[in-house]
Image: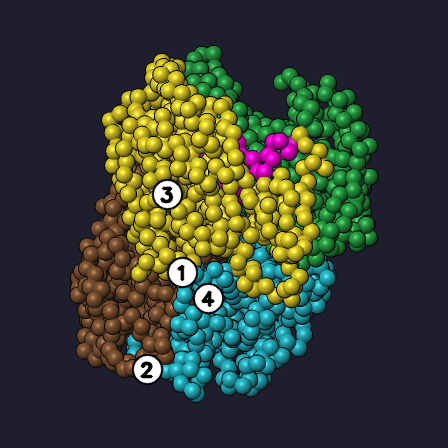
Chain colours: A green, B yellow, C cyan, D brown
Amino acid sequence: MSSTFGRVFTLTTYGESHGPGIGGVVDGCPAGLPLDEALIQRELDRRRPGARPETGNMGSARRESDTVHLLSGVFGGITTGTPIAFSIANEDKRSADYGPLADLWRPGHADMTYDAKYGVRDYRGGGRSSGRETAARVAGGAIAQALLALHGIRIRAFATEVGGLAAEWTESELDDAETRPYSAASASVIPSWDELAAVTRARGDTLGGVVTVEALGVPAGLGEPVFHKLDAVLAQALMSVGAVKGVEVGEGFGAARLLGSQNNDRMRPASADNGFKPQWESNHAGGILGGISTGAPIVLRAAVKPIPSVALPQRMVTRRGESLDMSIGGRHDICAIPRVVPVLKAMTALVLADMLLWQCRMDAVNLHAWEGRRPSCEGH
Amino acid sequence: MSSTFGRVFTLTTYGESHGPGIGGVVDGCPAGLPLDEALIQRELDRRRPGARPETGNMGSARRESDTVHLLSGVFGGITTGTPIAFSIANEDKRSADYGPLADLWRPGHADMTYDAKYGVRDYRGGGRSSGRETAARVAGGAIAQALLALHGIRIRAFATEVGGLAAEWTESELDDAETRPYSAASASVIPSWDELAAVTRARGDTLGGVVTVEALGVPAGLGEPVFHKLDAVLAQALMSVGAVKGVEVGEGFGAARLLGSQNNDRMRPASADNGFKPQWESNHAGGILGGISTGAPIVLRAAVKPIPSVALPQRMVTRRGESLDMSIGGRHDICAIPRVVPVLKAMTALVLADMLLWQCRMDAVNLHAWEGRRPSCEGH
Amino acid sequence: MSSTFGRVFTLTTYGESHGPGIGGVVDGCPAGLPLDEALIQRELDRRRPGARPETGNMGSARRESDTVHLLSGVFGGITTGTPIAFSIANEDKRSADYGPLADLWRPGHADMTYDAKYGVRDYRGGGRSSGRETAARVAGGAIAQALLALHGIRIRAFATEVGGLAAEWTESELDDAETRPYSAASASVIPSWDELAAVTRARGDTLGGVVTVEALGVPAGLGEPVFHKLDAVLAQALMSVGAVKGVEVGEGFGAARLLGSQNNDRMRPASADNGFKPQWESNHAGGILGGISTGAPIVLRAAVKPIPSVALPQRMVTRRGESLDMSIGGRHDICAIPRVVPVLKAMTALVLADMLLWQCRMDAVNLHAWEGRRPSCEGH
Amino acid sequence: MSSTFGRVFTLTTYGESHGPGIGGVVDGCPAGLPLDEALIQRELDRRRPGARPETGNMGSARRESDTVHLLSGVFGGITTGTPIAFSIANEDKRSADYGPLADLWRPGHADMTYDAKYGVRDYRGGGRSSGRETAARVAGGAIAQALLALHGIRIRAFATEVGGLAAEWTESELDDAETRPYSAASASVIPSWDELAAVTRARGDTLGGVVTVEALGVPAGLGEPVFHKLDAVLAQALMSVGAVKGVEVGEGFGAARLLGSQNNDRMRPASADNGFKPQWESNHAGGILGGISTGAPIVLRAAVKPIPSVALPQRMVTRRGESLDMSIGGRHDICAIPRVVPVLKAMTALVLADMLLWQCRMDAVNLHAWEGRRPSCEGH
């Protein structure tokens, strides 16, 4: 079940870049959730290809409407508890662009490894390994986000670094990030990213970056020790996105350089000021302790590698082991950051929806009379 | 199945820090693997507590023999294909040390989150959230490593950074790393880590660090796109270890700052020099492309946070929301690095054994006549 | 993952009776299997509704072409190892027929239980609980049968009893059963079943029956003790088909009345006559011992209940607890037997494909030098 | 994960008949359930070998105390939500009895199939395929029954047929069945079963039988269509017990011979008499419609084959294909019925606990305002 994610709220996806279409099945969504195609389409529109304001200077010329169709699981505008299937047709397929690549192993792409694994490969546009596959994640994640919203959980994401140029931002800027070009954490960094993108495009090269994802309103108690800790499954979720090469929670690698006394988060005791709920004074942990949510915001960072399809000529080999120098055609983005933001949000939402249902089940059968003793905490 | 890891080669663990014992069940191991307790004990000895040469200045005074007993699945010295159960008794339990902690939420520990999730908690020594749980991972990982060894796969791990002090090393030093104090990547860094540990212990504080894990000899073709990519599952595996807050593959966060033309790995074409197998010229990808192994070494880095049990007095709250200042008693390490190294190796081995079996199954029923066309590659 | 079946070779299905369509995703099929829509269509045509020769006197007037479309996972006529998605549009929907049933709990249907479970329900034609859902099983099973055929495994099924009238047959008649009306085990029973169907239709009532499924050419060694024994998973598979109320393996309930000395199957010793492979002399076990295939044919029987939609007026209640007497409209079969036969074949094939891949994986990494000692057996 | 059962409330078992011991791990049990060893021991005592009143004339001379030890997951007398491990030592091992069987394929046993599957085999007492494995199921099932009891669900089982001699009983006799020899459905049948057992033992032969399992108090709404229907998973559960060759739900094979108008269950409309809850008037369906519980009692029947270890000499072959005539030594029961009853109860409980938690999760997040409209029903 390589293409299924989750254990209670699950998403199964299918589809290649240049086949008839892509799509997926969400199984395990509770009955009664209001759902329609427009809600899913909004998220898909954030990911679809093309030079749009949000993609800044980094988008390609490829055009796809990425129109989603719901096929099952919804009746009278609400979910029925049965599998929710959706499909997205592939429209702007110029498969002829890819003919010359049939035997080629493009550097930084999965061509060589798919050949090694399967022996055969749909080489058109990357086939299954194309970033196009992530549209189905975004659709599934939109359903997860609708479920989370009803429980007061909201996910936001923003780019904090492109090509080594880091943004500086204030907390108040973050909620608007997704309306900015590149989903930039701050407006002030945009001109320099614009310029970097222009220069890089002119050089025929590509850029990487860093995205921060935050989940707000997550109650304490989500996550399943020991192997399915909340941070462990989030790490799988984000790292399963093709371009991601690193994942951090809270202080991340920075925690390795702190002293224990610095890295430990303290709580403010219960008082009239905080409604008699202990409150976190800091959030070095990124909202997760022992693999379980603390009630503070969940903070994740993902490192996104530069797009491997550079216009510059590169030396490459064919599956027969021959060498040749060539430049990759096709229509490619300069940087994955603008379009990967909704994908990382979607993956985070899928994990949280799954963990929420997993936990609710236990709450529902909670047998021990610890009511009144169970702690409740406010986020930072 | 929160305490089960893997899908074909699976490990289920159990046990609390101060209960009768811990242990686990490995299911899905093929029949015919030579296995005995000594082989598992060797790995456990690397993880067990106590001030030993390998733990340098960082170990605690707690003593456990961590003796493993095999209970099933082995007959006449080889595995039979049935579940392999093992148990490790808890010996040096001073549960009385923990009585005062029953209502306390220790900073940086999972006390608050276990209370939030379960309502009840075995507070003695951290219970299920104790690092002691990782001994069962090490035992399971030892079985996985035995299976991998027969397929020419070897895993090594070494500490590259402690408390912000980075080691510098040469490739030739790495195979011996596990025989050094701290599993240090180089001998030259040991004195400065010794000193840092001594100073930190004197101040009542603790340290974090960074560990690199490498898997050598992994054939191209392992990993299951799209959600169970090799890097995604490795990220889950490493992040599921309590102290880990960040995971990188290959260049990791560094990849976000490279240009596409720099980050792409090139292959040397097939020639008489390389036995007519294309060979990787670099390994920025860390041995994984599109979620599938490339045949080059798999390179992972894990950020390990400082141990939260500092001797310094800390402000903390109880589950009733009261505040108090106290210092954590018990016997604690200064830094998790020396003892987490075998745990990270074990988790990496569990993933690779699982993926190897997953792939073998497909190879065994390979239906298409692509023999002779299937690529084979040499690692870097 | 209620709508996912299997662990290595998996089928996920979706769709309601009167929504846009139904379909599914097969994941885990090895690369290299020749596959096209025609191969799947052949099996679907055996299940589709309508009065056809194969449905004898038992079919309804509903017409569906049940045309399948492949959406992914096949390239150049062979599978690529990625998910194989397929869709089947719903055509002959007369949803207006069902309006009056919105609040009604039809006897013998899942109306009441879906309401109890989900609170909401797509009441049109049974929604997800409609027998229409089984078309996706048949499509998935066709892919499984293609995989099995390449390994010399063939599945056949035949009706042995309808409305209490049992067929008598000879072994030589069985391979042709699926070409006969009702997939009858023998030609001689057809006239009496024709007559029984006509009489029952005239009375406004419906019939049940018994189907035998046999898998031929299954090698010894498939099945995963202890909980995923071959017979256990086959029982789940057949019982998951809506109308099935009982499952037997080999002698089934008859075994409960035999003495041990009668029920034990004996083997003929190796000799020149049987190519030095021990051979089964009888097959009371139905090809499975200890949950693992023996090499003899696998023999299963499924009890199929009468179709609950009888034309006779029945007393029923609404979801508000009111009582009323009415007769079910719509267009319904008299007996599920003719159309359930391909469904039971499909479910059997899905189990065997899954178990075959599960086992191949182990064979591929078999480590112990027992070659030459491993037994091979011929079926009965 | 062949030795893991369930998806939310899971049981993983291990152990061979003549190794150090057997045991298991229950994962997913909610925190707060009162649990101790005595509760588990009570169920184990019903299954343990030996000539006791309950085993009537059918028991063997083998003696095992089957003493269970809890190793984790319980603190202060209640479950903590973490894995609950337990172990049962093997005591009365006379492995020397089995030496001569090392190369022998005993008729009706899994010797041949384990050799075919794994190539190696712990031949002592059947190893993993021994009925001894079921003790771990009984222990796990005892925990499940404790959970179910708190939700008002109770499971009872009784033997209705031995060696073809059927019991006749009245409803009022069933609650006491487990206190009778053979767990007989009625007291009146015991003398004839006693005699049959005596005669059969004298002839060196063995007997099979039929067991009915009923679950009372199961709320409507449990079961997960379409592949994990309640009846489908129950069928897997019962058929996974070694000796079971057939499973029926409700009318079972009898349903195949009824007319639709006979087999359909009707409901009594809501009225003051039934507290305004519609009530089932009959229960041909055995408490399950569309794979979901109806609120009526769940009724299952399992066919148990005769014990294959007959004292009569039998012709058998070795793994080398040689033939010999011999009689099976060791100490064996005449009939599995008395000891299989608690095993079948345990398996039923494991399924219901799993399905209960699966459903509770959905109830807990139920989003649609259908309260007041959701039906509630009383069982038959």
- How far apart are labels 2 and 4 at the CA level? 25 Å
> What kind of element bears circle 1?
loop
> What kind of element bears circle 2?
strand
Q: Nearer the viewer, residue A31 or D237?
A: D237
Range covered by the magenta-colored residues: B233-256
Query: Which residue in the structure is indicated by mark 3?
Result: B43
| Label 3 Cα neighbours within 10 Å, binned few <14 / some 14-19 / many ≥20 | many
| Label 4 Cα neighbours within 10 Å, binned few <14 / some 14-19 / many ≥20 | many
Q: Nearer the viewer, residue B349 or D226?
A: B349
Query: Which residue in the structure is indicated by mark 4?
Result: C222
- How far apart are labels 2 and 3 at the CA level? 47 Å
Query: Which residue is at 61% across, 31% downward?
Result: B253
- How far apart are labels 3 and 4 at the CA level? 34 Å
Query: Which residue in the structure is indicated by mark 1?
Result: B31
Q: Is residue A300 visible?
A: yes
Residue C376: x and y in percent read 43, 75
Give the residue type at disc 3: Glu
